[in-house]
Amino acid sequence: MNAEAQDDALPLLALVYGSLSVEHPLRRLAEAARGVCRLLWVLPFDHKDVRVAIRLLKAEGEIDGEVVDASKMSPEQAADAIRLHAPDGIVCFVDETIAWTATIADLLGLRFHSPHTAALLTDKYRQRAALRDFGLPTPPFWRAEDLTDPAIVSDVVSQVGLPVVLKPRRGVAGIDTEPLRTEDALRRAATSVTPETMLIEGYIPDPATPLTGPGSALFASVELAASGGEISILGVTGRTPLAPPFRETGQLFPADIEPETRRALVDAAVGATRALGVTTGVLHVEIKPTDDGPVVIEVNGRPGGFQINEFVKRARGIDLIELSMRLALGERLAYPDIDSHTGVGFVFLVQPGSDMHRIDSVEGVDAALAIPGVERAVLRDAALRNEFTWRSGSLGYVAEVSGTARDHEDARRIREQVLATIVVSGE
């Protein structure tokens, strides 16, 4: 059988692709699909750059497959257009396309998150309510529009104290997420935001004694896969301390936590998966251990970002993108929970100070490559910009440094050297 005939025998997967700025590179997705499935590229949004990129890469032979431009179609029309190709499954990889994909999957009878589950995965208020109703601990939480009465604001402050956290109900990477430290700030926020867009919640308490290792943030994430309702734990990823107010500065795989804490985080992640009704797909569940047990920060209905896929691939031989594709096509896959790894994978994100509003220079990125353990150091394309704000969240980083350390202590030393080497200047 020749290669072309073999490709024709592969199942067809509809891949919903939203935006070049937040998605995995097109080449990377095509590479993950090789030998697994043929791809039908589905474009739900009117982004000209995506259409152009797909056309150029197809012409260069980098990717193949038909394209359905659904950007000007209703969900019913899009489902009809996709149905003509008779796909065997459907998948997406970013939050902004989950709800749309769920609607299309429901219309086509394809395996994916149900529309109800998709809504819980992409609306933090509804997600919090579902976790609470399932019996999982959550911080107190309110829709911002429910706190427009000053008397209610005073009751909230007396009930939960300050600070509280203001965050978008639909958002990623800590964008526009901030602490509100005074009653006046809470009152202003509740009356100034667009209704039904923001969530206010109590601050998840820090443990009296840190339950993550030295040099780690006080939370971690569990990477897992659900296959026909069976859940596999693929790893637990640690974090380096946040930059104010809630910006990520790095990831460590595996997390620097004791086995007992790890088990508690894993149990909480499995419970959250059940609470939201997820039966198939790869999830990224962020959790904070506290003195009273772990509290879920949020559940993301897709693989984790930054270097998590590379960490899991290197440590476990599992490509989370390929795994997502296989699960969407109906393969039943299960993996043992392995809590031992050789070395510590790391990625460090260099974040500007929260008081900066303009970035003039970023020096020392190339020099960081000379630090033992560093394998990659990249200046972000958008690093130098006339306007900078912490409201960009974790995505406002200016440089990314990744590699492998011998252990967590070695990773801490490497991070100290990276931060001493890369200097951000501006106003």
Image (cartoon, rainbow, N blue to C red):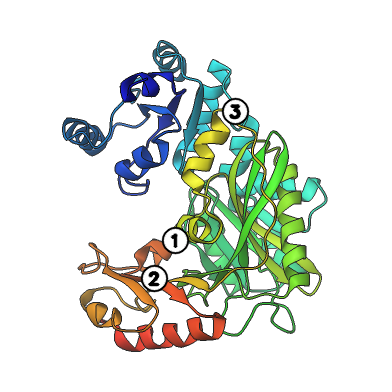
Q: Is residue 186 left or right of residue 13?
A: right
Q: Nearer the viewer, mark 1 or mark 3?
A: 3
The label number, if any, that marks residue 385 in the structure image:
none
User: Earlier along the polypeptide chain: callout 3 or callout 2?
Assistant: 3
Mark 1 / mark 3, whichever is N-terminal? 1
- Above or below residue 15? Residue 208 is below
Q: Is residue 332 left or right of residue 304?
A: right
Give x and y (percent) for residue 317: 52, 53
Residue bearing mark 3: 330
Q: What is the count of numbered marks?
A: 3
Spatial separation of the CA atoms under disc 3 and disc 2: 34 Å
Q: What residue did someone put label 1 on?
A: 307
Nearest to the observer: residue 100 or residue 312: 312
Identified at 75% across, 71% down, the residue is: 259
Q: Position of residue 185 (x, y in %)?
A: 54, 69
Say above or below: 111 vs 174.
above
Residue neighbourhood size for the residue with mark 2, other residues' Cα within 10 Å, grouped as few (<14), some (14–19), many (≥20): many
- Quickly name the residue at label 2: 402
Question: Do the numbered discs 1 and 2 sit on residues whose CB atoms are within 8 Å?
Answer: yes
Separation of marks 1 and 2 at Cα, in angstroms: 8 Å
Find the distance from the CA under tag 1 to the CA under tag 3. Answer: 26 Å
